[in-house]
Image (cartoon, rainbow, N blue to C red):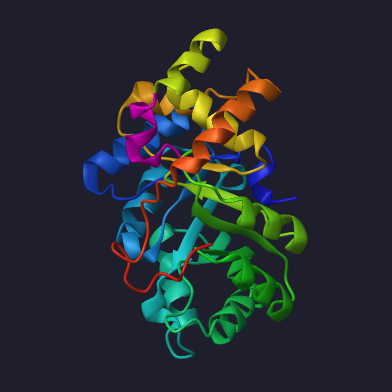
């Protein structure tokens, strides 16, 4: 079982691309409604501001689950561990709850970066480790390379994209999935089905989408700067989608709408 399904951590608050006062206010609003899992990355350039905002919430450290990710620019023996130490300093914590590799190594020889990730775990810099944007085959390869449990593969996951191959790999490897772009950056709202289903439950289209992801066994990562949306994205635990509605939404995965691909990230792998 992934750490993200402990406590309230299955609903994580993402911080990309927020910075400055906007980031500070959003984190405080998220903490106020109950978020205790927060997600950042070296690549986002906001770890220090995230750390300051989390400190300002007044929440106890052991109530928080803080995830950060190592940038591919630091996937070398001389840079990896120092970069993690700097992330911890910026976040004002002694240990990351979850440390991820943000992307597969360009060229896709993933062994060294995974070994360095293992070292970060062994040295106590991270309580848990995982990966992001890995293909199904990479998940199998990673499981064979790393001794410590990999608690997640954070990937693009929403009802407009079929990720059955990754879900199958998650079952086979024991590496659970976590979602980003959970509402496809608003693309889901162009499809009436989500609002129609939501009306039957007294929930919004976004809440239906997020609930569908959770019921697929995938934790969610959402971001908003609007307090009402921040609260609504958290308020998805008091209803259950029927099997019929789950199947109706499942049919939408044939849309094949992908946000993060080689056109956006040239070093992305050939996704499943």
Farthest bottom residue in view: 78
x then y, percent, for residue 36: 54, 39
Residue nearest the observer in this picture, 53 or 265 = 265
Which quadrant of the structure image shows residue 213?
top right
Q: Percent from the top left, x then y, of residue 145?
A: 69, 80
Seen in the picture, residue 203 relative to 105 is either above or below; the reply is above
In the figure, 9 relative to 29: above or below? below
Look at 33% across and 28% down and name the residue there: 190
Residue at coordinates 52% horizontally, 24% vertically from top-left? Answer: 208
x, y percent for residue 256: 44, 47
Q: Is residue 33 above or below residue 8?
A: above
Q: Is residue 161 above or below residue 226?
A: below
* Quarter where residue 243 is shown: top right
Write down the region rendered in magenta.
Answer: 182-191
Q: Residue at x 40, y 53 (%)?
A: 51
What secondary structure prevails in the magenta region?
A: helix
Residue 65 or residue 272, whichever sits in front = 272
Residue displayed at 66% across by 34% down: 215
Tell me if residue 92 is in the magenta stretch.
no
How many marks overall? 0
Foreground pick, 14 / 50:
14
Residue 128 occupies quadrant = bottom right
Whether residue 8 is visible: no
Q: Nearer the viewer, residue 81 or 255?
A: 255
Q: Is residue 48 left or right of residue 158?
A: left
186 magenta-colored: yes
Residue 52 appears in the picture as rendered: yes
């Amino acid at each position: 079982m992934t750490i993200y399904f402990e406590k309230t951590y299955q609903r994580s608050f993402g911080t990309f691309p927020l910075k400055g006062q906007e980031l500070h206010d959003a984190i405080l609003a998220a903490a106020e409604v109950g978020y205790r899992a927060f997600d950042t990355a070296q690549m986002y350039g906001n770890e220090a501001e995230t750390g300051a905002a989390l400190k300002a919430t007044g929440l106890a450290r052991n109530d928080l689950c803080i995830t950060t990710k190592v940038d591919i620019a630091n996937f070398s023996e001389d840079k990896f561990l120092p970069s993690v130490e700097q992330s911890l300093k910026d976040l004002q914590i002694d240990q990351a709850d979850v440390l991820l590799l943000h992307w597969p190594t360009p060229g896709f020889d993933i062994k060294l970066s995974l070994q360095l990730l293992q070292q970060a775990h062994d040295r106590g810099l991270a309580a848990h480790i995982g990966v992001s944007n890995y293909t199904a085959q990479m998940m199998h390869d990673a499981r064979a390379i790393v001794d410590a449990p990999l608690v997640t593969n954070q990937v693009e996951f929403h009802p407009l994209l079929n990720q059955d191959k990754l879900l199958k790999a998650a079952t086979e490897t024991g590496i659970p999935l976590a979602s980003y772009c959970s509402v496809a950056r608003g693309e889901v709202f162009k499809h009436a089905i989500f609002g129609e289903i939501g009306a039957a439950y007294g929930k919004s289209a976004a809440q239906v989408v997020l609930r569908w992801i959770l019921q697929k066994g995938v934790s969610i990562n959402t971001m908003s700067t609007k307090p009402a949306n921040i609260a609504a994205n958290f308020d998805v635990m008091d209803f259950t989608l029927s099997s019929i509605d789950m199947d109706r939404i499942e049919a939408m995965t044939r849309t094949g709408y992908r946000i993060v691909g080689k056109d956006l990230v040239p070093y992305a792998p050939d996704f499943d």
